[in-house]
Every structure is written in structure tokens, then in C-alpha cells.
Image (cartoon, helix red, strand yellow):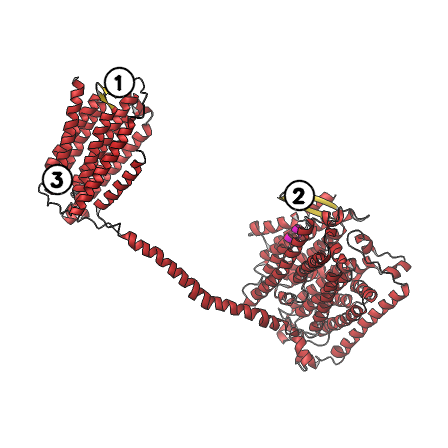
Amino acid sequence: MEKLVSLIPVFPLVGFLYIIFLGKGLSKNTIGAIGSGAIFLAFITSILVFTTQLHGANPTIVKVIDWITTPKFDIDISFIVDPLSTIYLLFITGVGFLIHVYSIGYMHEDEGFNRFIAYLNLFVFFMLILVLGDSYAMMFVGWEGVGVCSFMLIGFWYKDMANNDAAKKAFIINRIGDLGLILGMCMIFFHTGTLRYDDLFISESAASGLHGWDLHLAAIFLFIGAMGKSAQIPLHTWLPDAMAGPTPVSALIHAATMVTAGIYMVARSSAIFSASDVASDVVMWAGILTAILGATIALTQNDIKKVLAYSTVSQLGLMFTALGMGAYSIAVFHVITHAFFKALLFLGSGSVIHAMGGEQDIRRMGGLKSHLPITHITFLIGTIAISGIPPLAGFFSKDQIIAVAFEENMIMFVLASVVSALTAFYMFRLYFLTFRGSFRGTHEQEHHLHESPKVMTIPLIVLAVLSIFGGFMGFPHAVGHAMHVPHWLDHFLENTVEMEVLDMSVGTESILMILATVIALISMYIAYTKYMKNGELALEDDEITSSTHQTLASKYYIDELYEKIIRRPVDAIAQFARNVVEPKIIDELVKQVSLIPSGLGSVAKAAQNGKLVMYVLAMIAGLIILLSTLI
Amino acid sequence: MELLPNVTMNHYLLVSVILFVIGVAGILFRRNAIIMFMCVELMLNAVNITLVAFSKVWGQSDAQVFVFFIMVVAAAEVAVGLAILMMLYRNMHTTSTDVLDKLKW
Amino acid sequence: MLTEYAFWFLSFVAIFSALAMIFSKNPVYSVLSLILTFFAIAGHYFLLNAQFLAAVHIIVYAGAIMVLFLYVIMMLNLNRLEEDKKSTWMKFLSVAAGGLLLFVLLAVVKRTDEITITAQAANSDCGLVENLGKVLYNDYLLPFELASILFLGAMVGAVYLSKKELA
């Protein structure tokens, strides 16, 4: 059964190749069916592979073919089947399938439809390589592949220069992270002689060959890679801009799957990170700072997708906080629940944008509840889920992060709770402004409002169901024990990632759960009073009134800061090279050098004087020299 | 080795060398393109003599076939070369290579 | 004995008329001297048992090529050449080059003495038409055919070049 794993990436790859090379004459529905069908087959196969891991971890390496074979370095193209990779498989292909189906409806009018579906397929292929690869080298292939797909999809509407700029920004910032990842891989290889997970963590533990600062540095370099991919401070600025891509892309790549690759990588390297307290602290602090930054910026954004983007940044920050505290399985848990509700929210926002005819500003919306009933219900479920109100998915995963923080580090606990409260507030702000109150857009837009077709609403419904029940795979330990509900996910991942065993009484855990719920409900109420009660748009959201608001709305001026400290100097250097180095030094040098052959040429030119006799003489001279060697 | 009574291979080579150098000297001393042409023919024939002599030494016909082909090429060359000379004379009214020196940089 | 004398005689004629060719002022004399040289060379071919080549040589060179030269000279009316103006420096250079070449070639020829050639049993029949024909049409058929194409090309080229309208 494990052997089937090598088939999983093949489906999307074949789908991609087929659509790109043979898809020209096919109708959009056929293309959509091929694209989603490929992912669906991958999903079915993933379930089959997943079942092999259900009864106790059973890591298997499935080798496909040799890749790089040298005496010192041996990397195969082979896949790893273990609980961590299979659970990622399930939600990548599952959520990926739903988003493919949704895209058929969302992108139906777009002339680049074929290209879009093909890119999505290619993205899924690389994402699968990323999680299935049995070594850091294989993971890196997928890592770069999803980066390229992300680049192509952010700049999908390439006729608008702003989209291209956003795509370039995402790609370049990711390069910085990738450099860190490469350095981390080099350090691991240098000290252990292998990049295979099997040698490093599973059958042998070569990773223990790293000690002291080698270990810390290797872990920090790996984390820099994760920073780039998962948008952590200071490399987070690309993700909000990446919203320039079509909404399904934001849902699939920039919320559910690719941005969580960093969490996958850290969880996969949990043996390294748990051995390095320095790196863990770095991860934790970077995570919580990102979480606060994202959450506070999200309070002031007026673009529906930007709010969700900063929310994603913030949630990713929380996941890294959990990783930094050693709660790897809980971070993975949050990745999964987040994939459900954030994909749901993005697709819901896509449905709204679709209905509004491309409008993304929530100040122009309002009162969509009656026009888009299904979107409204599912969006509300997503909002409740992310806000952490039981018993929806987000509550369980986020509550456990907070619980771990309570045990580990009081500062983290307070900050994580603040983030949680902010999350509930900005999400309900988004919800109220979008769906409640009265419509604030133009008359024309109001006339145009319509519910999205079934092909778009069904994925929303499925994701909503998952957002409701997804949390039960990780029922809290103490309370769960008392209620005889096991923490299934922790058991499942037990032997794959390092485990943080929480020793918490039922009482403490219950109090924390109640506290988290109360915080979320209070935030929700504040949002309600502020945005619902008057039925009018709150003043602050229309015009900027305070300097704090100004700072947040400008995203802490981080882009401006980068512009000043990085881009300006680089531009200056480039200008200098262009205005001075190039014309004054290099060109001059070339000109001087060119004088040598032309000088030599004018000397040699005299030899070709058109006098036949001279040629004959030269020939005879040559002949004499040649013959004299025979004497 | 004697090819004829008292005549060795070297005798033939000697004759050939002398004729060849006369041809070279003719090209160097004369400026008339037609005479220079004839000198080229003379040099070709000097080489032909050695080929035939070698053919005799080794008892092989191949060298004589080479001579045959050299004659073929020489004939073709003369035909075209003289045609070019005619054209030159018609346009420049000379066949002196001192005047015909326009083919240069 | 007779063949030995014949060799010396033919060699003398060839060299003497070759010299006459390059030194005569009148190009018509030059052509006639060259024809004499060619006859002497044909005589050498006879002595070397290359009868076919000797015949072809006379037909092609004396009969065709040299006649062509004569025609051209007559058509261009070149029987009185303007004498070449040569600098003494050029003359010296030419003499030096020619002398040096002669010296080097002679040295090379002399060295062939040192190389012992073990000759095959001399097959005096190799120059006969029959044998030559066999070699030519068996081993060298392709070059032979290519030569015909070369000739065709040369012919077309010559005709085209000498057309009056071109001028």
C-alpha cells in the first residue's frame, strides 16, 4: 500500500502537462474536470496511503530512482510515508481539490483559465514533493517549485504591473529565506554527512552529530528558510502583497498550504529544534511578534483580502510560537484547522468579490447577508472558527497553543491571548462590515449582487463542515481524558515529531478553555457594539484619526523602512555602477583594449598590399621553412 | 636504384626540382599574368614527373592516375583563369600584376 | 645505352626551353618554348613506360592548353609586352628566394639517397592503357566522375566570364 505514494505526485503532474500541451481545444469545463480530477485521484490515493499509518507510526521510504550518487553524497528521488507526511498529504490534496473545484466557477470568465488550472496542478505537484521528499534535498526541490508556482500565480494577471511587482517581491523575499535554508542544509550535511530524514532522525539519529553553536546555527538557518516561506518577521512583507493573485490562489497557496511549508519543515526537524534552546527561543519570539504585528495591522485594513492576509500572517506567527515552545504536534494541528477555516474564509471572500464585481473594499460592502445566503453562513462559520469559539475547529488548536504557553512562558501566554482577542475582534469587524448593516456600494453593484454558482458554494459548504468538526481530531488532553475522548492527533504523531507532554489538571485546562472563550466572546461583543449597533460605518474606518491608527494602517512602515535601508542603497549602488563603473571604467577599458588589435591590424594590413609577387614570396618563404625541417 | 640503365630515381628528382625552381623563378621575375600562368603549368608538370617516376619505382598505377587528375584540374584552371585574364584585359587594358593590385584590404 | 642518352637529352631540352620560356620577351616565344618543354616531359613519360600519360600529356597540354594560351595572346595582341619595371631590391629578393628554394630542395633530394627503397618487382606494364584504365574505372571512379563535373563547371564559368556583354 505504501508503494502507492509514488503515484500521488504523478496525478497533478500529468494534469499539468496535459492541460499545458494538449488542452488547447478543450472546453473550460473539461479542463476544470481534468485539473480537479487529477487532484481528486491524488486525494483518494492519499487516503489509501494514510490508512497504513493509522495503527501506529510505520515510517516507510519508497524509492523511485537514483538522483545524485557520489561516494560521499547519496540522494534518491524517494518518498517518505509517515504520520507527518500523510497528514499533510490529506489536507493538501483534500483542500486542494475543493479549491480546484471552486476555481472552475471563480475563473470561468477568465481568458487564462487553462493556464490557471495548469499552474494550480503544478503547484500541488511541487507541494506534494515538498512534504513527501525523504530528504532535505527533495524537500528543497518542492520548496523552490512551490515558490515558482506562487510567483507565477501572484502575477497571474500579468498585464497589471502592480501584480508583477507583487510577484517579484514575493519571489525575491523568498530567495532570502531560501539562502538560509540552503545554509542550514549545508551545515547539517557538513556535520552529519547526510540529508536524509531516515539517517538523521528515524533509523539512525545522525542529527545528534550537531552540537553547541553548530546546532543552534543550523536550526536558525533552517528557520530563516521557514521565515521566508511562512512570512515571519522580518520577511513577512510579501504575503499581504501576494493577494494580488486570484482569490483561489490566496486560499490554496497563501493560506492553506505553501505558507505552512515552514511549519512542516520545522516540525520535520523537530529533533534539531528541540535540541537547540536558542533556536527555539528565536522561533518563539519571531512567531509571537509576527502574530501581534499581523493581528494589529489586520485591525485597520479595509481590503477584505488584506485583512485575511494579515490574519494569516498572525496565525502563522502563532504556529511558530507553538513550535518554539516545543509543541510541534499542536502547531501541525493548528496548520490543519487553519487550512480549513482560512481556505473557507478566502473562498468566501472570493465569492463576495465575485458578487461585487471585483470590489474588495469592505467600506463599500455591507448587508450582503440576504444576497449571498450560503456565502454568509459559511463565512460566519469560518469567522467563529478562527475566533476560537467552541466547539469549532479553531478553538481547539488555538486553545492548546495558549495552554502550552501557560505552562511554558507567562509572557507568551499573555501575548497569545491578546492575539486571540484581536483575532476575534478584526474577524468580526470584517464579518459585520461585509454582511450586516445596509449596503454601501453603488446602485449598479447592488443590482449585480448574486449568489455564486453551485460549483463555488459546494466547496464552501464542505470546508464549513470541516471547520466545524475538524477540531475534534485533537481534543484537549486533560479534559479529553476525563471525557474519554483521546487526543487523536498527538497519538498519531507521537513517534514522528518531538512531543511536549503537558501535565495539566482538568481544572486548569478547563479554566483556560473558558477564559479563551470568554476573551473571544468579549472581543466579538466589542466588535458588535462598534460596527453593528449604530448600523453605520464607524468613523475611524473611514478616516484616519490617530497616529496609532496611522501607524497600523501603514503596516508599521516596514515596507518604507525596507525601501530606505535596503532598496535605496542597492539602487544607489546600481546607479553608481551604471553611471560611473560601466561607462567610465569598463567601457574605457574595453576601448583601450580594442586599440591593441586595431593597432596590430594596421601593421599587418601592410602585408596585404595586393602585390602578387609579395604573396608568392611569402609562400615560398613558408615552403622553404617547411622543407628545411626535412633536411 | 636505377629506373633506366645508369639513370636513378634521383636523376628524375633533380630534373623535377630544376624545372620547379625555374617555374618559381619565372613567377618571381615576370609581371605578365599570362607568363606567370605558364610558370604555374610548368611547376605542375615538374611534380608530375616525380609522380610518374615513383609510379615506375613502385610498379603501381595509382600515381599515374594522380597525374591524370592533375592534368584535368590544370586544364579546368587554365580555362577559367584565361577567361578571367581576358576580362581583366578588356577592362584594365593590361595583364601586368604591378597594375592589377586592387584586391586588398 | 640509348635510353640513358635519351634521358640526358630530354632533360637538357626540358630545362633549356623552360629557361627560354621565362626569359623570352615575346610571349609567343614563351608559349612555344613551353610546348617544347612539354614535349620533352612527354618523352620522359615514354622512357618511364607511361605511354598513355605521354599521349594524354601531348594532347591536353600541347594540343589544348597551350593553344588556348596562344589564342589569348593573339586575341589580346600581346606580342610586345611593356617591360616590367623592377627595383633592384625586388630582384635581389627574388633571386634569394629562388636560390634558397633550390638549395633546400636539392638538400632534400640528396637526403633521399640515405633512404633505402626496397622496390617492388618493377611492373613495367603499369603505365599501359589497359592497366591504367582498370585502376581509373575501378578504384577512382568517383573522382573521375567528379572531375567531369568540375570540367562542366569550368566550361560554364569560362564561357560566362568571357561574354562581351558582361563588360
Residue shown at 80%/60% (left/top)? A471
Q: Quadrant of the N terminus of chain A?
A: top right
**A239 or C23: nearer the eye?**
C23
Q: Quick one: SS at disc 3?
A: helix
| C25 inside magenta stretch | no
Question: Marks 2 and 1: which is nearer the front?
Answer: 1
Spot occupied by residue A538 in the image (x, y as percentages of width and height): 71, 80
**Relative to A460, does residue A51 appear above or below in the rendering?**
above
Query: Which residue is tagged 1?
Result: C124
Mark 1 residue type: Ser
Spot occupied by residue A180 in the image (x, y as percentages of width and height): 64, 59
| A138 inside magenta stretch | yes
What is the C-alpha distance between the residues marked 2 and 3?
A: 84 Å
Looking at the image, tell me whether mark 1 or mark 3 is earlier in sequence order. Answer: 3
Mark 2 residue type: Val
**For residue A598, side relative to residue A308 (left or right):** left
What is the C-alpha distance between the residues marked 2 and 1?
A: 75 Å
Tell me if mark 1 has few (under 14), some (14-19) or many (20+) residues whose alpha carbon lies within 10 angstroms of its own. Answer: some
Q: Which mark is residue A64?
A: 2
Query: Which residue is tagged 3?
Result: C73
Tell me if mark 2 has few (under 14), some (14-19) or many (20+) residues whose alpha carbon lies within 10 angstroms of its own. Answer: few
Q: Are marks 1 and 3 in contact (CB under 8 Å)?
A: no
Q: Quick one: SS at disc 1?
A: loop
Report the span colored magenta: A136-140
Q: Residue furthest left?
A: C80
| Disc 2 chain ID | A
